[in-house]
Image (cartoon, helix red, strand yellow):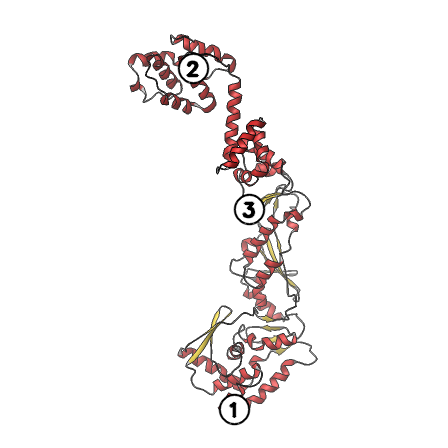
C-alpha cells in the first residue's frame, strides 16, 4: 500500500456516519481479532501474538471510561488506538469527526487519545481493506513482514512474499481487464497490437500482460497489486517491461527496437508509485525507445510504429514524397549518421528537423549547381520559412534554368519582339496563368501591341471577359494571329526562333 501523508479535516458528523462508526467499534469489544492478521507464515515467533495478548489485557477495561481514557494516552500507538476505539464504543455520540483521504475514499474517524491518526483510522475502519492496513503498518515495517489485505480479512505470511491464492484471485479481479488465464499468468491482448505491457509479480510467479489497445488511461496494474499489501522496503515485488511492438516494413523480421524492453528506473518508480497509468507507461517507454535507439548497433529509421531498420529508401517512400522531395530527402539522409525515429513524419518535417546539418546537400541534389545551392541555403537559414519551401523554389529555379538554357539568346530585339519573347518564356517557366497575368499587368496603350496581346490571351485560354479592352479591329487581328501565338508558346527549342520571327512578321512589325 502506498504510504503517503493522510490528509485530514474536522467536520460535524452526519448522523448516519456517526451511528455506523459507533456500531463498528462496539464490535471490537468482543476482541481485537478484526485488526490482527491471520497467520500463514512460518515465523519462529509471531510479533502479532504479543500484541494480541496486550490488547486482550486492555479488553477487561472495556466499560471503564476513566481507565480507557488513560490507556488511550499512554503506551505504544497500537495499544493506544485500540483503547481509543473501546472508549468510543462506550459513547452514544461522536458529534465531531475528522475526515481522512485513504486511497480514493474519504473516511471519517473520531480523534480520541494520543495515538497516531493512521492507527485510529485503521482500528475504526477495520472493515475497509485499504484502511485496516494503516493499523498494522508500523509493526509490519519494524519486523519485515508481508501482510495482504482482502475483502474480509488480513493475512500475514511472515518474511515470505508469496501471496495467498485468494489475494491473487481477488487482486486480478480488481484490475478490471478482460484477462484470460495463460500458462504463466493472465493476459488481455489484442491480436492486431504487438505493443504490450508485462508486469511480473515475482513472488506469485505470475505474469500479467495487457496490450496498448486494451490498456487503460486510468488503471495501473502495479498499484492494484501493491495498494493492499505491506512489504519490506527493500523487497523486489514486481518486474516491469514493455514490448514496444514496432512493425518491420519487410513483414518478415523483427525490428531491432523491439529488443529495448527494459523500462527506465524513473518511469518504473513513477508507475509503481501509481503516478502514471498502464497506457501512459507504455507510451512513455515507446518515447524513450525512440530517443535511445543508439543502443541498437546499426542505424534505424522508423515512423510511428513502423520500422524500416536501416533501409532509408523504404523510410523515404513511406512519407509519400513527390519527385523533388524524394531527391532532397535522399541527399539529406545520405549525409546524416543519426537514427531517424519519429512519432509522425512528413517530407517537410524531416527536412526541417535536419536542415542545418545537411540541408545544403539536399539543395545541391535538386539544383546541380553548388553556387546556387549555397545561395539558397544561406537564404533559408536567415528565413523563418520551412526548408521545404526553399527546396520547391530551388527546383523551380533549376527547372527554369534548364528550360531557358535550351532557348536562343537575343542581344537586341524590337519592343514588340521583346514582349512576345517575354510572354513565351514566362509561359514555359511559370505556366499559362502567370503569362496571362504578365499581359494584364503590362497592358500597353500603344496600338502595335494590342492585337498581339489579345492573340496571346486567346492562345492562353484567357481571352474571355477581356474583349472590352480592345477595338473591333484589334480583336479581329488578334484572332488572325492566335494560331501563330499558340505555335510560339508550344514550340520546341529548335523551332522557337522561327516561330517567334513568323509571329512578329505576321503582325507587321520588325524583329
Q: Nearer the viewer, mark 1 or mark 2?
A: 2
Indicate the quadrant containing the N terminus: top left, top right, bottom left or bottom right: bottom right
- Contact flag, marks 1 and 3 (Cβ < 8 Å): no
Q: Is residue 96 above or below residue 329?
A: below
Mark 1 and mark 3 lie on one chain; the one further toward the N terminus is 1
Residue at (45% x, 79% y) in the render:
20
Q: Residue at x 58, y 51 (%)?
A: 287
Write the residue at 44% across / 12% down: 413
Q: Position of residue 73 (x, y in %)?
A: 53, 85
Report whether residue 387 is seen: no
Gap in angstroms between the C-alphas marked 1 and 3: 68 Å
Q: Which mark is residue 418?
A: 2
Residue 67's disc number: 1
Percent across and percent down for residue 493 are 51, 15
Residue position marked by numbered label 3 in the rendering: 343
Q: Secondary structure at mark 2?
A: helix
Q: Quadrant of the C terminus?
A: top left
Of the two numbered discs 2 and 3 on the same chain, state the one appearing first in sequence. 3
Q: Position of residue 417 (x, y in %)?
A: 42, 13
Q: In the rendered view, would you say 344 is above or below 12?
A: above
Amino acid at each position: 500500500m502506498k504510504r503517503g501523508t493522510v490528509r485530514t479535516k474536522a467536520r460535524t458528523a452526519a448522523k448516519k456516519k456517526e451511528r455506523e462508526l459507533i456500531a463498528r467499534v462496539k464490535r471490537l469489544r468482543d476482541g481485537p481479532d478484526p485488526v490482527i492478521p491471520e497467520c500463514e507464515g512460518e515465523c519462529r515467533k509471531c510479533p502479532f501474538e504479543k500484541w494480541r495478548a496486550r490488547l486482550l489485557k486492555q479488553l477487561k477495561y472495556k466499560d471503564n471510561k476513566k481507565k480507557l481514557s488513560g490507556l488511550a494516552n499512554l503506551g505504544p500507538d497500537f495499544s493506544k488506538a485500540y483503547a481509543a476505539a473501546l472508549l468510543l464504543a462506550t459513547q452514544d455520540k461522536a458529534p465531531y469527526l475528522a475526515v481522512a483521504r485513504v486511497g480514493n475514499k474519504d473516511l471519517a474517524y473520531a480523534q480520541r487519545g494520543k495515538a497516531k491518526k493512521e492507527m485510529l483510522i485503521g482500528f475504526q475502519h477495520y472493515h475497509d481493506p485499504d484502511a485496516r492496513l494503516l493499523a498494522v503498518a508500523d509493526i509490519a515495517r519494524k519486523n519485515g513482514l508481508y501482510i495482504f489485505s482482502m475483502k474480509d480479512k488480513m493475512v500475514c505470511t511472515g518474511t515470505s512474499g508469496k501471496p495467498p491464492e485468494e489475494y491473487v484471485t481477488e487482486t486480478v479481479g480488481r484490475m478490471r481487464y478482460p484477462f484470460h488465464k495463460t500458462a504463466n499468468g493472465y493476459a488481455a491482448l489484442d491480436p492486431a497490437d504487438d505493443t504490450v505491457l508485462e508486469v511480473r509479480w515475482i513472488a506469485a510467479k505470475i505474469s500479467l500482460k495487457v496490450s496498448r489497445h486494451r490498456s487503460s488511461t486510468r488503471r495501473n496494474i502495479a498499484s492494484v497489486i501493491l495498494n493492499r499489501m505491506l512489504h519490506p522496503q527493500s523487497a523486489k515485488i514486481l518486474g516491469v517491461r514493455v514490448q514496444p511492438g514496432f512493425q518491420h516494413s519487410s513483414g518478415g523480421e523483427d525490428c531491432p527496437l523491439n529488443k529495448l524492453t527494459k523500462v527506465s528506473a524513473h518511469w518504473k518508480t513513477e508507475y509503481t508509485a501509481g503516478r502514471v497509468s498502464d497506457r501512459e507507461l507504455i507510451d512513455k517507454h515507446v518515447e524513450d525507445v525512440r530517443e535511445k535507439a543508439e543502443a541498437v548497433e546499426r542505424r534505424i529509421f522508423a515512423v510511428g510504429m513502423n520500422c524500416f531498420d536501416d533501409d532509408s529508401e523504404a523510410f523515404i517512400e513511406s512519407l509519400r514524397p513527390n519527385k523533388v522531395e524524394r531527391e532532397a530527402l535522399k541527399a539529406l539522409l545520405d549525409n546524416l549518421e543519426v537514427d531517424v525515429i519519429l512519432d509522425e513524419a512528413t517530407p517537410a518535417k524531416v527536412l526541417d528537423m535536419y536542415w542545418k546539418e545537411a540541408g545544403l546537400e539536399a539543395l545541391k541534389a535538386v539544383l546541380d549547381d553548388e553556387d546556387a545551392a549555397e545561395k539558397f541555403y544561406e537564404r533559408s537559414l536567415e528565413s523563418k520559412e520551412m526548408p521545404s519551401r526553399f527546396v520547391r523554389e530551388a527546383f523551380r529555379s533549376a527547372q527554369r534554368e534548364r528550360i531557358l538554357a535550351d532557348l536562343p539568346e537575343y542581344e537586341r530585339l524590337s519592343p514588340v519582339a521583346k514582349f512576345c519573347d517575354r510572354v513565351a518564356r514566362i509561359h514555359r517557366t511559370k505556366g499559362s496563368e502567370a503569362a496571362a497575368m504578365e499581359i494584364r499587368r503590362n497592358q500597353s496603350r500603344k496600338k502595335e501591341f494590342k492585337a498581339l496581346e489579345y492573340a496571346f490571351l486567346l492562345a492562353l485560354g484567357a481571352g474571355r471577359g477581356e474583349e472590352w479592352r480592345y477595338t473591333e479591329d484589334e480583336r479581329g487581328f488578334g484572332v488572325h494571329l492566335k494560331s501563330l501565338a499558340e505555335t510560339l508558346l508550344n514550340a520546341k527549342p529548335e523551332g522557337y526562333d522561327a516561330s517567334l520571327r513568323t509571329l512578329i512578321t505576321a503582325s507587321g512589325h520588325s524583329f
